[in-house]
């Protein structure tokens, strides 16, 4: 279980997270929705040690990881696929995947995960020697997810994986997130596409200017009038 308690983050004078309490139980899909600038990316960056909170605690498997070293946090199985498609454009698909496994030395496990990536993303297999920078936007997002999987995550955190993707590709990414979860990986998802995200979520949190204003199961939030108006584009 990943747990955030009273987490507070400042950027200079900007109070970006104002006392966040959140739980991500093992094996679940947990979603965070919120408008631009609400603090969603700040939260994920704090979990992986890229942003240092001013106060509050982050615990993982009962151990305190607040303000930890990002490399150490990755090696404990918390993996972030950041906003935007961060692939290495001048490296091939194959080389990008190899880099995803840089912190591991279990050769057999790496080989197995590589095969699993190609099962999940046959398109990447067809393009194994292609430079990542020449892949389409959707293919680059697939590669970003696949590279995250190569580090054998216990929790996979995805910051807006469907941003800018065509509906069919976006649906495929959501299907794959569910598939990854069924294979035992916990998911913490940030999404602008609130409808698709809530549909696959066990539980979801709504973040507004640094504060959690609502939380419930995905199914309940999908039916909530305020959520429908604010995040699902209905009744406007
Ligand atoms: N490095 C930084 N320095 C100063 N302010 C920052 C920094 N990073 C984020 N902020 C500010 O903190 C607030 C939260 O930003 P954050 O990126 O976490 O929002 P977000 O919910 O991920 O938004 P989006 O949906 O647009 O990605 C914003 O007001 C942003 O301008
Ligand atoms: Mg963001």
Image: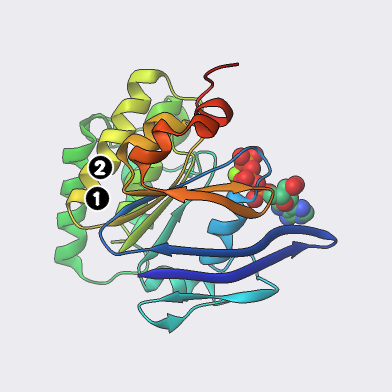
Judging depth in this view, the residue of 64 and 89 nearest the camera is 64
Outermost residue toward the right?
A: 13
- Is disc 2's CB within 8 Å of ligand 2? no
Q: In x, y percent, where is residue 57?
A: 56, 76
- Above or below residue 196? Residue 64 is below
State whether residue 135 appears in this view: no
Give the residue furthest to the bottom.
Answer: 63
When asked about the image quadrant of residue 184, the answer is bottom left
Residue sitting at x 51%, y 33%: 227
Distance from disc 1 to disc 2, alpha carbons, whole Å, reads 5 Å
Question: Which picture quadrant has residue 105?
Answer: bottom left
x, y (%) of residue 103?
36, 69
Q: Is residue 156 left or right of residue 32?
A: left
Residue pictured at 44% horizontal, 38% vertical: 161
Q: Residue at x 51, y 44 (%)?
A: 86
Q: Which residue is mark 1?
A: 181
- For disc 1, the neighbor class at 10 Å (few under 14, some 14 to 19, many from 20) is some
Q: What's the colour scheme?
A: rainbow
* 85 vs 215, nearest the viewer: 215
Placement of the N terminus among the 4 image quadrants: bottom left
- Residue 44 x %, y %: 53, 57
Q: Percent from the top left, x then y, of residue 160?
A: 49, 39
**Residue 39 in view in this figure:** yes
Q: How many marks?
A: 2
Pointer 1 with pointer 2, Cβ within 8 A: yes
Q: Secondary structure at mark 2?
A: helix
- Where is the C terminus found, in terms of image quarters? top right
Residue 178 numbered mark, or none: 2
Taking depth in this image into account, of 133 and 173 the one nearest to the observer is 173
């Amino acid at each position: 279980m990943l747990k955030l308690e009273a987490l507070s983050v400042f950027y200079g004078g900007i109070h970006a997270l104002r006392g966040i309490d959140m739980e991500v139980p093992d094996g679940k899909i947990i979603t965070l929705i919120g408008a631009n600038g609400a603090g969603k990316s700040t939260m994920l960056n704090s979990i992986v040690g890229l942003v240092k909170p001013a106060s509050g605690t982050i615990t993982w498997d009962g151990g305190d990881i607040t303000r930890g070293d990002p490399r150490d946090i990755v090696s404990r199985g918390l993996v972030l696929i950041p906003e935007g498609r961060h692939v290495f454009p001048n490296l091939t698909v194959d080389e990008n995947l190899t880099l995803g496994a840089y912190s591991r030395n279990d050769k057999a496990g790496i080989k197995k995960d590589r095969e699993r990536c190609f099962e999940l993303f046959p398109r990447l297999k067809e393009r194994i020697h292609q430079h990542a920078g020449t892949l389409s936007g959707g293919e680059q997002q697939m590669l970003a997810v696949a590279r995250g999987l190569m580090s054998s995550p216990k929790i996979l955190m995805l910051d807006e994986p469907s941003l800018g993707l065509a509906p069919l590709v976006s649906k495929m990414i959501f299907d794959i997130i569910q598939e990854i979860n069924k294979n035992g990986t916990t998911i913490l998802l940030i999404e602008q596409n609130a409808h698709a995200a809530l549909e696959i979520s066990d539980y979801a949190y709504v973040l507004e200017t640094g504060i959690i204003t609502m939380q419930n199961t995905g199914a309940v939030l999908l039916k909530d009038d305020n959520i429908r108006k604010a995040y699902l584009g209905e009744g406007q």
